[in-house]
Image: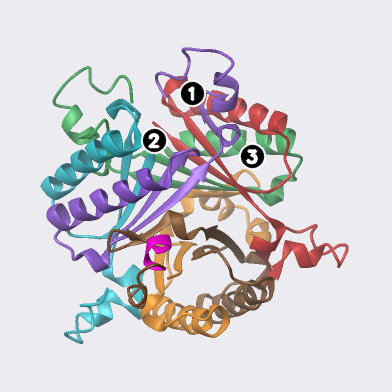
Chain colours: A brown, B red, C green, D purple, E orange, F cyan
Amino acid sequence: MPVIQVNLLEGRSREAKRAFAAAVTKSACECLGVKPTQVRVIFHEVSKGDWAVAGTLYSDMDEKPGTSSSA
Amino acid sequence: MPVIQVNLLEGRSREAKRAFAAAVTKSACECLGVKPTQVRVIFHEVSKGDWAVAGTLYSDMDEKPGTSSSA
Amino acid sequence: MPVIQVNLLEGRSREAKRAFAAAVTKSACECLGVKPTQVRVIFHEVSKGDWAVAGTLYSDMDEKPGTSSSA
Amino acid sequence: MPVIQVNLLEGRSREAKRAFAAAVTKSACECLGVKPTQVRVIFHEVSKGDWAVAGTLYSDMDEKPGTSSSA
Amino acid sequence: MPVIQVNLLEGRSREAKRAFAAAVTKSACECLGVKPTQVRVIFHEVSKGDWAVAGTLYSDMDEKPGTSSSA
Amino acid sequence: MPVIQVNLLEGRSREAKRAFAAAVTKSACECLGVKPTQVRVIFHEVSKGDWAVAGTLYSDMDEKPGTSSSA
């Protein structure tokens, strides 16, 4: 039954998301006592211009090396 | 006042979403006792590569006919 | 496949939510071409102290009759 | 620690989002007692065909001037 | 940077959530290439009266054994 | 039109949320060009046992002073 929504910055490959969805589903079954068919994982890719940490958009951090390390 | 967010796979037509938004709003008014102007419906279209059921992305299911029926 | 999340103010009865979930699911099947078993509806009840419209919490509106009509 | 998700209609400029993210982060620090590095702001842009008020999609309102004023 | 929100039915123990959060974080680091400190996992517990599958609330399924198996 | 959802740890006072909702609404009007009545702010309070950073629940951090500073 769990519905797992993942907000992440754009740019991860299909393979990375495939592996993560499989791993999360496996962990849900082991830790939460559900069956694989009950687990849904939904990715919401967010562009760097749409995500801010400490008041600064990621797209602006790119121009200031080092500021993204704590994100 | 209800804010209704709908995560669905990409590919539904404008007409389909128009009809669903109208129907959901009507149901909200009838069942929850609100006025039409108080209801918001927001669709979040998700690509097949961003949604997994049972640990498998929909985009991978397309290559394995039959696996999507329980989604 | 649709996952439908409904944010609404606390206080609706079990019966109201039961009727709304059934109606929304029926509409999803008719409008979006999915099967009933594919539809999930999740309610998130929000207290009046946790929802603001026009910068004013609903809990504060109660003390100012008339301000909630446009919510 | 707050994670602030903003659903808004598409079309705001990078500069508008930059200013809003900075302002929200500042307000979070002042009102909620957190540090800037603890605040995340995520924008989810929604197209006019994916957002309905009063049962009508914004994309349909454009053809009916005046109806969007209460949105 | 990923923000992972988990909607699940109420009733999981603290230990179950602790183990799941740790496992998901580990998977995010391995699959998505992020650092542990960048990962946030937020659980939203939902009561059985607030979650419907196939138009039926979980709280109503309890009275009809067998219907919850496909949830 | 913006719908702003704020996930935050439980424990903020009504006054803190009142001030934040007012400030965010004001910023939305100034930065995004909307009217106050178009802005909705919804708080989702999360318990310390339901939020993890770096794979550790906040409720567990309380027992390990210093680990929460980067949250």
Give percent across and percent down for residue E8.
48, 62
On the same chain, marks 3 and 2? The answer is yes
At mark 3, the secondary structure is: helix
Q: Amino acid under label 3?
A: Thr
Give percent across and percent down for residue B71.
72, 58
Crowding near pointer 3: few (<14 within 10 Å), some, many (20+)?
Answer: many
C-alpha gap between disc 3 and disc 2: 18 Å
Q: Quadrant of the N terminus of chain F?
A: top left
C-alpha gap between disc 3 and disc 1: 16 Å
Mark 2 or mark 1, which is nearer to you? 1
At mark 2, the secondary structure is: loop
Q: Chain letter of disc 2? A: C
Residue at the spot 11% in from the left edge and 46% down from the top edge: F15
The answer to whether any part of residue B34 appears in the image is: no
Mark 1 lies on residue: B29
Give percent across and percent down for residue C51.
28, 40
Q: Is residue A21 left or right of residue D52?
A: right
Write down the region rendered in magenta. A58-62
Name above or below for residue B55 compared with residue C40.
Answer: below
Mark 3 lies on residue: C25
Q: Chain letter of disc 1? A: B
Residue at the spot 58% in from the left edge and 36% down from the top edge: D50
Q: Nearer the viewer, residue C71 or A13?
A: A13
On the same chain, marks 3 and 1? The answer is no
Mark 2 lies on residue: C12
At mark 1, the secondary structure is: helix
